[in-house]
Image (spheres, rainbow, N blue to C red):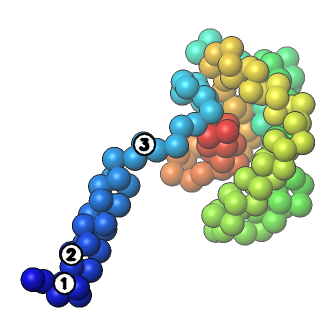
Amino acid sequence: MPSSKATDTASSAKAKTTTATAAATAKPARKRSARRLDIRLKRAYDAPDPADGQRVLADRLWPRGLAKAKAQIDFWAKDVTPSTPLRQWFHQHPEQFDEFRQRFLDELAALDAQHNAMLTELRERLAQGPVTLLTAAHRLVDDDTPTHLHVLRDFLESH
């Protein structure tokens, strides 16, 4: 007859295997949206394109030197951009993008909890079809360098 210690070890190993199998087969949590949102990122200075869908400026400040008529902007979502203090902090610390990302996500979550009208409007526009988020940021030219638009897109896709 096996000792109780050997039986306990065998039971423990079986429980670990069962737990590992259950974790491996568990489905990931579903996002709110059943379909992937069509969100594109572009500089506000780039020429409008019919494939842009609705053009949404996601900058707190209007792009310098850009005429409103030429920009063909459908909606200016300045409330769903980084706050002025966060924007200024990030300009001084561009190497700390991970910290910026977390702070901006916290700001967006707070807006979401308050049922912000501009965030609601942006979601309604996304439900209608493609949306191109626009910024004046030079960083957008280099796809390897993320901007606040990348954070906003990720937030919208996950909430």
**Residue placed most toward the observer, 34 or 95:** 34
Could you say whether the residue bearing mark 2 is in a helix, strand or loop?
A: helix
Q: Position of residue 122 (x, y in %)?
A: 77, 27
Q: Are marks 2 and 1 in contact (CB under 8 Å)?
A: yes
Q: Judging from the image, what secondary structure is the residue with disc 3 in?
A: loop
User: Disc 1 marks which amino acid?
Assistant: Ala
Please tell me how crowded label 3 is: few (under 14), some (14-19), or many (20+) other residues with Cα within 10 Å. few
Question: At x 74% / y 40%, what residue is drawn?
Answer: 136
Residue contact between numbered discs 2 and 3, judged by CB atoms under 8 Å: no
Residue at mark 2: 10
Q: Are marks 1 and 3 in contact (CB under 8 Å)?
A: no
What residue is shown with label 1? 6
Q: Quadrant of the C terminus?
A: top right
Q: Is residue 90 visible?
A: yes
**Residue underneath mark 3:** 27
Q: Residues within 10 Å of mark 2 (few under 14, many from 20)?
A: few
Residue 24 image position (x, y, % from top left): 33, 52
